[in-house]
Image: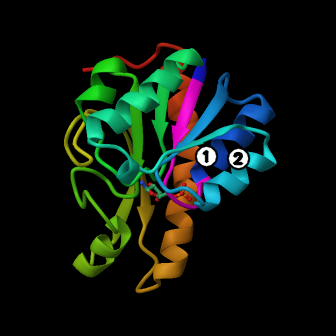
């Protein structure tokens, strides 16, 4: 299965997915990393695995549609079948959604529908929940709103943001790999 991973930042989920592929736990091929933030650390990680990066700044396009169309053109050229969002900090709109219907997934660091949007971990801690978690879901035009594919619960480590974050990221890396394996094997039905 040919996939593209979209990321705006560190890219630890990208790396976890690629490592699972290398270990033979996930039958997929990351043909391309796409970033909207030229210079993001994910580029360094991609280079370590010899995976090409398409770095396009939306600002340099006339519209969001033109920006997304440039991405779609490249994805088509490379026979990409699935788009895996991993810390891509931008809403996806109709150009990408139309070209990749029910083929775009995202990971979010909370148990959706709780705490969508930015800083979900901070939101959960501020709310004082004792259990939070991780969600993999199909992407639609909303902010973290598409149909849920898989979730894992993570206990909040009392008042300790750093340890809680670490536990959540660990859970993300495991859940994303497992969920993608199921998806690519055709074992998940898009609602
Ligand atoms: C992850 O917490 C992901 O759930 C969220 O953004 C973060 C990206 O982390 N959407 P990384 O870039 O994969 O390290």
Q: Quarter of the image for the N terminus: give it.
A: top right
Using the image, determine if residue 32 lies above or below residue 163.
above
Q: Position of residue 4 (x, y in %)?
A: 55, 31
Q: Please tell me which residue lies in front, 117 or 126.
A: 117
- Residue 126 covered by magenta stretch: no
Q: Residue at x 54, y 77 (%)?
A: 163
- Residue 4 covered by magenta stretch: yes
Distance between mark 2 and mark 1 Cα atoms: 8 Å
Report if the CB atoms under discs 2 and 1 are less than 8 Å apart: yes
Q: Please tell me which residue lies in front, 83 or 177.
A: 83
Count of numbered circles in the view: 2
Q: Position of residue 115 (x, y in %)?
A: 24, 61
* Left or right of 191, for residue 32: right
Q: Which mark is residue 187?
A: none
Q: Is residue 1 visible?
A: yes
Q: Residue at x 50, y 17 (%)?
A: 76
Mark 2 residue crowding within 10 angstroms, few (<14) / some (14–19) / many (20+): some
């Amino acid at each position: 299965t040919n996939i593209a991973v979209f990321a705006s930042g560190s890219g630890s989920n990208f790396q976890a997915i690629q490592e699972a592929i290398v270990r033979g736990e996930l039958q997929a091929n990351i043909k391309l990393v796409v970033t909207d933030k030229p210079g993001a650390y994910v580029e360094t990680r991609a280079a370590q695995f010899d995976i090409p990066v398409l770095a396009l700044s939306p600002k340099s396009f006339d519209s969001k549609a033109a920006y997304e169309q440039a991405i779609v053109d490249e994805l088509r050229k490379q026979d990409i079948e699935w788009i895996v969002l991993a810390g891509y900090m931008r809403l996806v709109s109709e150009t990408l959604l139309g070209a990749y219907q029910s083929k775009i997934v995202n990971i979010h660091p909370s148990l959706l529908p709780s705490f969508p949007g930015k800083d979900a971990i901070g939101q959960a801690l501020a709310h004082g929940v004792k259990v939070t978690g991780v969600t993999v879901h199909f992407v639609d035009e909303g902010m973290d709103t598409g149909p849920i594919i898989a979730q894992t619960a993570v206990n909040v480590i009392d008042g300790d943001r750093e340890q809680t974050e670490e536990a959540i990221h660990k859970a993300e890396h495991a859940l994303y790999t497992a969920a993608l394996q199921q998806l690519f094997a055709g074992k998940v039905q898009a609602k």
